[in-house]
Structure formats: structure tokens, C-alpha cells
Amino acid sequence: MTCERDVETDEEEPQEANGGSADLLELYTTYVETTVNVSNRRMRNNRFYVLLLSGTLAVISVLAETQIIEATGLLLAGLVGLALCTLWYLSIVSYKQLNSGKYEVIGEMEEELQFKPFRREWSVLQEGKNPRTYITHTWVERKVPLVLAFPYVLITGYALLQLFTT
């Protein structure tokens, strides 16, 4: 480990063996943690929408089976479900953009380090360009709201059919 003298305080600042200062390494570690926190929020957000949309489908099916809900209620439920699926999809895109920005900043920070783990990992994964090497989580994740939107499309279509044929 080498040392660099701080002229104002006459203290020695340790230099890490990997080429970055201790402050940069601490900042880097903290910033990586914020990226993990965003990913955790993203997963909680996905869990919320899955539970909300699938629970709503369960309630709709019970109400429809017992004929408690009429076509107007089904139409409203279908449209609300589709709106929620759209919001969820946009949320996934937003989280992807946020994470992309964070990884770009991490890459810039890694320029000051000898070993660049995230850049190396992305290189090993061929920057996500070869689906045989790596399929991005976001690619898969964006399909789930589309799949869950399908029953809501059917509900909306059924409700419209009921409203216009009776």
C-alpha cells in the first residue's frame, strides 16, 4: 500500500493496491449498494403488481361466477386491470433506465480502479448482444405484464360483448 500526504492536514491517505483511493473505493462500494437497493425495490414493485393483478382476477372470477358483478362492472375491472398492467410495464422500463444509468456511473468510477468487475462481467456476457450467452432480466420481466394483461383484455372484450348484445 502506498501513501499520499495531504498537504493541508499533514495526514497520510492510504492508496489501495488496486489503484484507487480508499475514498473512491468506499464511494464505489456505497454506490454499488444503491444499485442493489434499486433492484430490490424493483422486485418488490413486481411482486406488488403480480399480487394485485392476480388477486383482482381471482375476485373478478368469483364475482362473475356468482353473478354478483354485471357487464359494466366487468368492463370497469377489465379497463382498470389493463391500466395497471400498462403502469407496471412503464415502471419496469423506468427501473431499467435507472439501473442502466447507475451501471454507467459505476463504469466511470471503475476507470479509476485497476480491476473493473462490472465492466468485466458485461464483457463476459457479450454486453447482452448474444441471447445464448445472456438474456437480460428486463427482457423477460417486461413480458409478465403483457401476459397478465391478456385475461383483462378477455374480460374487457366479454363485457363489451355483453353490453352491446343485450
Image (cartoon, rainbow, N blue to C red):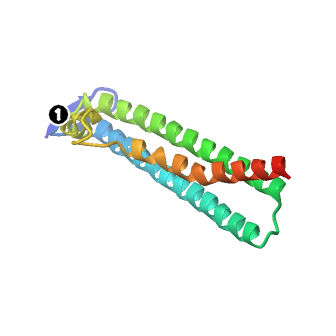
- Is 5 above or below relative to 67? above
Q: Quadrant of residue 51?
A: bottom right
* Residue for badge 1: 114
Q: Quadrant of residue 116?
A: top left
On the image, the x and y values in percent for residue 36 come to 40, 49
Q: Residue at x 38, y 46 (%)?
A: 137
Left or right: 53 as drawn, with respect to 37: right
Q: Residue at x 34, y 34 (%)?
A: 106
Q: Residue furthest front?
A: 165
On the image, the x and y values in percent for residue 61 come to 68, 66
Q: Is residue 4 visible?
A: yes
Q: Residue at x 32, y 38 (%)?
A: 23
Q: Secondary structure at mark 1?
A: loop
Q: Quadrant of the N terminus?
A: top left
Residue type, numbered disc 1: Gln
- Is 10 above or below relative to 50? above
Q: Badge 1: few (under 14), some or many (20 or more) residues near its Cα, within 10 Å?
A: few
On the image, the x and y values in percent for residue 75 come to 77, 51
